[in-house]
Image: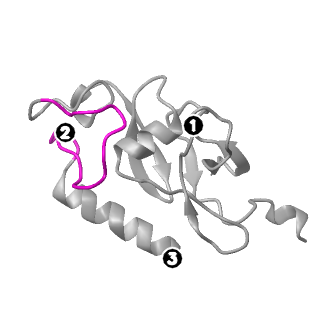
Amino acid sequence: MSHDGGVDLLRRIRARNPVGSGGSAPGAGSPEGSAGSAGSAGPAGPGSGAGFEFSFDGLPVRALPGQSIAAALWAAGILSWRTTRLNGRPRGAFCGIGSCYDCLATVNGAPNNRACLLPARAGDTVTTQEGNGRAWLQE
């Protein structure tokens, strides 16, 4: 999976479901369950009003106070933000409780952060983690 493919997918999802529309992308699923009525996407949905933005691979992502980076990415329809070392296979959240390490992401330049445990903060810069995320050790 190419890195740019995920960015293109995010743009297509956002074009179909602008922020504040209350809907979710077809097939993206919702970690909070059913979205309910139109215009109300639940407590972590885009129509909730309060919140802030952080960037993921250069694109803005909305989040709510206390929401983990993984939850905010899921809510935005982003299901993968890491690739494996050996085969470059996409990974995202698996266990959601910090046990499996599938959700590792590079946050503000620091690799190997568990996105399911780390609360999103306004202005954070989150990038897809390629391989082991320790490029500085390979020099």
- Principal secondary structure, stretch drawn in magenta: loop
**Camera-nearest residue between 29 and 21:** 29
**Above or below — where is 110 with respect to 66?**
below
Instruction: Look at mark 1 in the image and give the residue it sits on.
Output: 116
Q: Quadrant of residue 127?
A: bottom right
Q: Position of residue 81 (x, y in %)?
A: 54, 56
What residue sits 33% from the left and 31% below the top? 32
Instruction: Look at mark 3 in the image and give the residue it sits on.
Output: 2
User: What amino acid is at disc 3?
Assistant: Ser
Q: Position of residue 128 (x, y in %)?
A: 58, 59
Counting residues from the start of the chain, the first of labels 1 and 3 encountered is 3
Residue 106 located left or right of residue 46:
right
Does the stretch in magenta take in 105?
Answer: no
Does the stretch in magenta take in 28?
Answer: yes
Q: State if disc 1 and disc 2 touch (CB < 8 Å).
A: no
Q: Position of residue 79 (x, y in %)?
A: 44, 53
For the residues labelled 2 and 1, the Cα–Cα distance comes to 24 Å
Residue 78 located left or right of residue 3:
left
**What residue range appears in magenta?**
19-36
**Above or below — where is 66 with respect to 39?**
above
Residue 105 located left or right of residue 18:
right
User: What amino acid is at disc 2?
Assistant: Gly
For the residues labelled 1 and 3, the Cα–Cα distance comes to 23 Å
What residue sits 89% from the left and 63% below the top? 137
Instruction: Look at mark 2 in the image and give the residue it sits on.
Output: 20
Q: Position of residue 91 (x, y in %)?
A: 56, 58
User: What amino acid is at disc 1?
Assistant: Cys
Callout 3: helix, strand or loop? Answer: loop
**Camera-nearest residue between 109 and 90:** 90
